[in-house]
Amino acid sequence: MPISDIKNRSTFLLSALHPPHQDDLQWCDSASIDLLKTLVTDQSNKHLLFIGCYRDDEMDADHKVSVQFDIMKKANVKFTTIKLDSLDLYSLTSFVSERLRLPCRLVKSISEIVHRKSLGNVFFATTFLQSLAESGLLTFSPARMRWIWNEAGADATNISDDVVEVMAEKILSLSSASQDVLKTASCIGATFDASIVKSLMSDTSHPERHLAKLAKQGLIIKVIHNDYSESVVHYKFSHDRIQQAAYSLIPNSEKEALHLCIGRMLKKRLSGTTSTSSIFKTVDQLNRGAACFVDRDEQVELAILNA
């Protein structure tokens, strides 16, 4: 099927969803952005609501998504922007209260420390609490049947203001085999097929065992998809920053080759019943690894897919 027909059918199917949504718009590829523009500027979609999420600190005025936003606004597409700010001390105290299952009045002191260290960022706050537990500064007391903490130790604990750096340090504390599994998965995407990770890695490294460990540690989440008559095991990163951190640990010299390998593997799995999203993912992986092409026929094939 020509790629143009695929895009047209995708637009039709997406417009039938209510409401279609896309997370992490700042990382979208060009094909996805074009599809989004077509979807929201189509005047026949009278009752369409599209929800998109993005990090404004990663998108300047020249970012490809920002440019498309300007084009959409000029086309009189109605926008509503909802900015999610960091938590204030009151809200963060409620958050800590729920995590530690204690009344707000009892967690006031530790909440003030967490708020000062995390600046109200929920992901930072969660990571900071986990680091306190791992270092023994936050422990559960069986005698008192509640969580207790070392305030002086917590206050003296440093936390990086870079989320990716924090997660990268956590990943580097894992075994080398677990690191390799996580880095390979980060190249595939936010959600990935466990069988692809297994195919990309040596059987002697037992990737499925490490995937289970990573899920137990909360870095990834196991998801079961029913694909016709069989269940397919997928995992997804529990937070996009974890994927970003794992990806940042891969040397730039290795990324393109890994993407090309993934793209070729996904292309072999394509068939007449392949979903549109699978085709887009395949093309995206091949595009990321295009610099490693040595076969001209493969280059021509990719050019046709991108047409």
Image (spheres, rainbow, N blue to C red):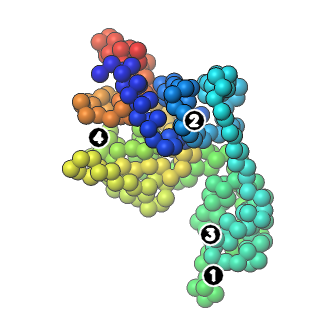
Instruction: Name the spot of residue 13 as percent of width and height, x first.
Output: 40, 35
Instruction: Name the spot of residue 166 as percent of width and height, x first.
Output: 62, 50
Dot in front, 1 or 3: 3
Residue occupied by mark 3: 99
Q: Earlier in the sequence, mark 1 or mark 3?
A: 3
From mark 1 to mark 4, how far is it between C-alphas? 45 Å
Dot in front, 2 or 1: 2
Q: Secondary structure at mark 1?
A: strand
State whether residue 151 is above or below residue 184.
Answer: below
Residue occupied by mark 2: 25
Residue occupied by mark 1: 146
From mark 2 to mark 1, how far is it between C-alphas? 41 Å
State whether residue 138 is above or below residue 170.
Answer: below
Instruction: Name the spot of residue 159 as percent of width and height, x first.
Output: 70, 54
Q: Is residue 19 left or right of residue 285?
A: right
From mark 3 to mark 4, how far is it between C-alphas? 38 Å
